[in-house]
Amino acid sequence: MNGTAATPSTKAPSSRRTTCVNGIGMYHSWRRNFNSPFFAILDIFDNAVGAGCHGTVTDRMTAKGFKGRVDLHNDVSSFQNEHRTDLVIMNNSLNPICNLEEILEIHKSNKGDKSDSIGQNGVGLKQGCAALTDLSFVFVRNHQKLSMGIIAKSLQHEAGCYLPSFDLPTKDYSTTDGSDDIKAALVQIFSYKDNADVVECVKSYGFGSLDFGLNLLTKHFYSMVDKSKWGKDDYVFGLVISGVRDGENDNIDIDELNHTGGGSLVTAVESSLVTDTASA
């Protein structure tokens, strides 16, 4: 996964989309939606489980052998003398995942007006991420189409709310050179001057190193196409919550959650998904 940033161009490949809503105020509003980050994690996890259960009876009968799967784990990154624990959630889906630009649309929700609901395609995703951290990355794969979005406090301003998303060129990234191709595509995206503030988010994720940040993003993308991991699924959703907040409310430790029943919960959920799909 070697590579250096390309020479910056003047314009980004797609127009920059912001809203007239105060971005700083909106982010703080999302963050206050949960009394505890612990409940935000549980709701995001519940939504990931739901993605494997959605669909009509016809969908389930057509999806032969589909097995809903959710993975939640700590991802420990080390760079020089710095260390950080991120939370990674990935799940497959019975149906195609909504376009990432729509997922990150302000005020967009696929669960009605319930303020306590988390949706991969709605406002709840933003609320959950903001309650847990100041920097999150969202990943979507629909067949060979890969997309990434960023939910970051640093990108919000009084003049507008900005939740950027980017599509990688559509191709088969599951080859032996796939990780290099993914990183090259990311380098190209972040070479545009219009994406300078987004580049700072990637650098922050990489402990101040853009190259290391790109390597981490590439790792997550490649796990979605790797046949030994998620590559055999048609639709995959991923979320990386960087440096789960341990401030005002809770210090979330996913390993501790697993020891207190989280791990067995995942196993039970996967079993129920398999049973539910088979009985449809």
Image (cartoon, rainbow, N blue to C red):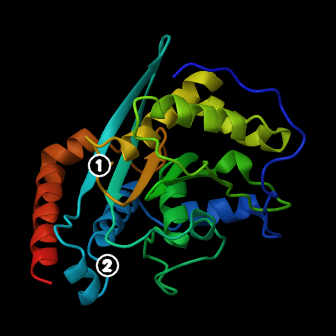
- Name the N-terminal-most of marks 1 and 2: 2
Question: Who is closer to the viewer here, 14 or 207?
Answer: 14
Percent position of residue 84, x then y: 44, 28
Looking at the picture, how far across and down is residue 44, in whole percent? Answer: 38, 62
Give the numbered dot on residue 221: none
Q: Residue at x 47, y 38 (%)?
A: 243
The residue to which callout 2 is attached is 54
Badge 1: residue crowd in 10 Å (few <14, some 14–19, many ≥20): many
Q: Amino acid at mark 2?
A: His
Q: Residue furthest top?
A: 80
**Image x and y of residue 225, in percent:** 39, 45
Q: Nearer the viewer, residue 9 or 89?
A: 9
**In this picture, is 27 found above or below 190?**
below
Q: Can residue 246 be seen in this snapshot?
A: no
| Side of 35 where 24 appears, left or right | right
Q: Is residue 248 left or right of residue 257?
A: right
**Quarter where residue 85 is shown:** top left
Q: Name the residue rendered at 11%, 53% in the picture.
A: 264
Residue denoted by label 1 = 72
CA distance for labels 1 and 2? 20 Å
For the question of whether residue 83 can be seen, the reply is: yes
232 sits to left or right of 191: left
For residue 71, above or below residue 124: above
Residue 252, percent from left and from top? 35, 45
Residue type highlighted by circle 1: Leu
